[in-house]
Structure formats: structure tokens, C-alpha cells
Image (cartoon, rainbow, N blue to C red):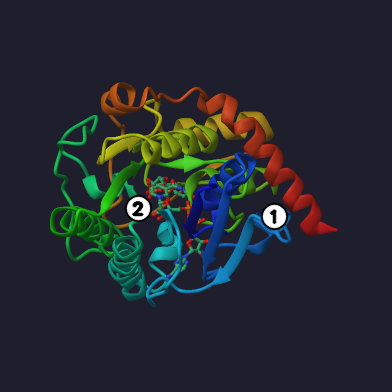
Amino acid sequence: MTTRNLVTGGAGFLGSHLIDRLMHAGEEVICLDNYFTGRKDNIRHWLGHPNFELIRHDVTDPIRLEVDRIWHLACPASPVHYQFNPIKTAKTSFLGTYNMLGLARRVGARLLLASTSEVYGDPEVHPQPESYRGCVNTIGIRSCYDEGKRIAETLCFDYQRMHNTEIRVMRIFNTYGPRMLPDDGRVVSNFIVQALQGQPLTLYGDGSQTRSFCYVDDLIEGMIRLMNGANTGPINIGNPGEFTIRQLAELVRDRINPSLELTTRPLPQDDPLQRQPVIDLARQELGWEPKVTLEQGLEPTIAYFRERLANAAC
Ligand code: NAD
Ligand code: UDP
């Protein structure tokens, strides 16, 4: 019998790449999305396929479906989008995860939660292992997302303890690749779009803060291994290659138009100073590590945005 998968947030960046992998493996997929930041275009190529169904639904409302696996990704991921309506973001994280865990419990499905490195907040421990409990501001402008994901993790483990629900918790570090939105607001897409449009690249602060960027194909491989494996997590999935934001700007600029300027903008409140995953657990438990360097992953990402912007201009 084929596995029946529910992918919440399936029309988004990561969800649509996951759906491609599941569909290519011959599995059944229900994609559920409210299209807040997702696009039908990301999954249009599967419409009409007998193994694929699309449901417009908001995870803050309960839903009844018969599925074996729930990949729970629904939640805006970019600060620009999750701060647009922070109360809705907190509702999506709490109620959305609660509803999906309720569904998992009723039908005996395994649920994977797309959690985040943001549970570590602005970390005092560097790099961050899963055992680090984080340094999160409970009342800042990032809290709706950071605290939302923390309570979502808590709910998963309480469902496991109380109801034996099968859970997998994945802490995703900054991931980039084709199908990010040009106006997504995250740093990789911002820099590429700015450079392709011949505009200066906007460094927030002095650009000395760091992030570790994982290419989407590596990330999805880690997600699938976690779902298929025996370890509940939380497990960090990310690329340990750490870059300052200024280094990223230079890498992008040099590939697109070396004559462009870098300009500065104020650093947003609570912007973490540094971030790098410890991935020993993923290596041991999942036999996973990233294969694509930032230099390699930027190429298909730039090509994707070049084509999208060219089509938008037609
Ligand atoms: P994305 O914004 O592209 O995708 C999120 C999807 O969820 C969108 O299709 C959106 O329309 C949908 N959605 C949002 N709220 C919803 C709701 N209430 N009901 C139904 N659908 C809803 O973001 P992404 O980068 O693909 O992120 C996917 C998941 O991975 C998110 O949970 C995010 O927190 C997590 N994550 C991503 C990253 C990253 O770097 N991309 C890092 C850490 C965690
Ligand atoms: N950033 C930047 N310029 C931009 C967008 C983001 O310098 O145009 C910075 C941002 O302040 C942060 C880092 O890049 O320090 C990563 O931001 P992003 O929104 O991609 O992810 P997150 O902060 O959630 O890791």
C-alpha cells in the first residue's frame, strides 16, 4: 500500500520541494495550504496527478483526513511575513500544531514538526547543539515565531508522553534555494533580487552577524531521513558552514554584478548575532550531512530568480 502523506504548508518553499520528492517516490500526497506565503505555481505541475490532492485550508481550524504521515510545515518563516500579523503567527504555531497532533492521534499517523533554530534565540552558546535551551526574548518582535515554535515542540512531546503519538522534531537552520519568493524578505532572496535589479545590497547593521545557510535539497533529504528514522529529535538540520552577512553579500554581488554597492540599514530588534548548527546528532542518527556548499547552492538559486524576474518583466 502506498503511504498517504499530508504536507501542511505544501505550497510554500520547503513544502513544495518535499512534495516533489514524495511524488517522485510514488507516494500519495495531500497538500494543505492557506496561500498566505505559498503559491499554487509551486505545485501546479502535480495538479491532475492521481496521487495528488490540493486542499485550501487554514491549520488553525481542525480537519479530518485519513493519512499515515503528517509533515507539519505550515507557518510563515520570513520575519517580514511572520511579523505581518504576529498574533496570527502565534495562533498558527500553537493551534495549527495542536490540530495536527489531534489528527495524528486520531488516525495513528506519525507527525514531523518543522521547528527552527530560532528556538535558540540570540544564543550565548556557539555553535548550537540540541541540548542548548536557548535565549529567547518572550516579548520582542520575533517572539511570536520563536515562542510559537517552542510551544509547538512542547505540544509534540506532551502528545507523545500522554497519547504515544509518534513525533519527529526537526530544528531547521536558514535554508535557501529556488522557489523562495522574490519579496520573501529573507537575506538570500533579498540580496539576489537586489543584485539582479542592479540595486545596492542592504546589510542590516554592519553585516558582521552570522548565519549558516543550507541548500534546500540537502534540507529535504534530512527531513525525509528524520521522518523515516527511529529518533524523535529534536535534531538540528542545517549546514555548519558559517558566514557573516557581509560575506554573503559579497558572494552574491561578485556572481551577479561586482560593481554594486553594499549599503547599511538599521539592525532589526533581537536580530541574533550568530548562528551555526552542531550536526553531530544528525550525522550519528540519520547518517546525514549537507553536501552542497553555499557557493554551489547560489548558482541554481540565482538562475531561478533570474528567470522569474525576466518572466515578470515580459
Ligand atoms: P514558506 O513561507 O515558504 O512556507 C510556509 C507555508 O505555510 C506557505 O505555503 C503558507 O501559505 C503556509 N501557511 C502559513 N500559515 C498557514 C496556515 N495558518 N494554514 C495553512 N497554511 C499556512 O516558508 P518555508 O521556508 O517553506 O518554511 C516552511 C516551514 O519550515 C515553516 O514551518 C518554517 O517555520 C520552517 N522553517 C523554515 C526555515 C527556512 O530557512 N526556510 C528555517 C527554519 C524553519
Ligand atoms: N538581513 C540583511 N539584509 C536583508 C535581509 C536580512 O542584512 O536584506 C540580515 C538579517 O538582519 C539577519 C540575517 O540577514 O541578520 C538573516 O536574516 P533572515 O531574515 O534571512 O533570517 P533570520 O534572521 O530569521 O535568520
Q: Which residue is nearer to you in this view: 269 or 260?
A: 269
Task: Say which residue appears at 42% left-offset and 72% top-offset.
Answer: 64
Q: Quadrant of residue 129?
A: top left
Is 189 situated above or below 86?
Answer: above
Residue 259's disc is none
Local crowd at mark 1 within 10 Å, few (<14), some, or many (≥20)? some
Q: Quadrant of residue 49?
A: bottom right
Q: Quadrant of residue 224?
A: top left
| Residue 104, percent from left and from top | 33, 60
Q: Which residue is nearer to you in this view: 171 or 124?
A: 171
Ligand 1 closer than 8 Å to label 2 CB:
no
Task: Say which residue appears at 26% left-offset and 59% top-offset.
Answer: 152
Tell me if residue 245 can be seen: no
Tell me if residue 249 can be seen: yes
Q: Which residue is nearer to you in this view: 75 or 112?
A: 112
| Residue 14, percent from left and from top | 51, 48
| Residue 16, percent from left and from top | 58, 51
Dot 2 or dot 1, earlier in sequence: 1
Horizontal relation, residue 258 to residue 288: left or right: right
In the picture of the structure, the residue carrying the numbered disc 2 is: 111
| Residue 136, percent from left and from top | 18, 53
- Label 2 residue SS: strand
| Cα distance between the residues tagged 2 and 1 | 23 Å
Q: Amino acid at mark 2?
A: Leu
Horizontal relation, residue 143 to residue 299: left or right: left
In the picture of the structure, the residue carrying the numbered disc 1 is: 46
The quadrant of the picture occupied by the C terminus is bottom right
Dots 2, 1 in contact, CB < 8 A = no
- Label 1 residue SS: helix
